[in-house]
Amino acid sequence: MVAYDATKHALQTIIDMNDRLVDLFIHLCIQNNGALPQKKRQADFGFLSDEELAAMESVIQDRYGHLRRDH
């Protein structure tokens, strides 16, 4: 739980989002090997810039080392 809370904090330092969206972002990225699915970006996270998204995905990949993007 401590690692999850640290991940949430790291993401919220990139962009201020409510807890529900941060939790959703983490969940979706973990399910998709460290990357936010394109359809979910458009549906739920269209407000993120490319730079913010890349930084946030990097946090997930760094903290959950077994996840790696294939593309």
Image (cartoon, rainbow, N blue to C red):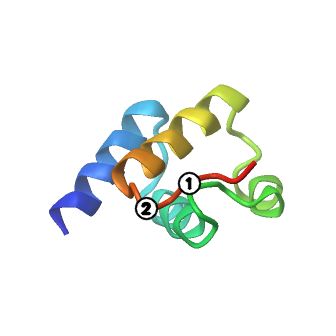
Nearest to the observer: residue 70 or residue 54: 70
Q: Could you say which quadrant of the image residue 54 lies in?
A: top right
Element at label 2? loop
Residue at mark 1: 68
Q: Residues within 10 Å of mark 2 (few under 14, many from 20)?
A: few
Q: Could you say which quadrant of the image residue 62 lies in?
A: top left
Position above or below: 50 against 11? above
Is the Cβ of the residue at disc 2 closer than 8 Å to that at disc 1?
yes
Residue at mark 2: 66
Compared across the picture, whether 39 is left or right of 26 comes to right
Position above or below: 59 against 52? below
In the rendered image, the quadrant that contains the N terminus is bottom left
Marks 2 and 1, Cα distance to the nearest angstrom?
Answer: 7 Å
The amino acid type of the residue labelled 2 equals His
Element at label 1? loop
Residue at point 70% right, 31% down?
A: 49
Position above or below: 22 against 50? below
Image coordinates of residue 40 in percent, x first then y, are 75, 62
Image coordinates of residue 12 in percent, x first then y, are 40, 41
Image coordinates of residue 30 in percent, x first then y, are 52, 67
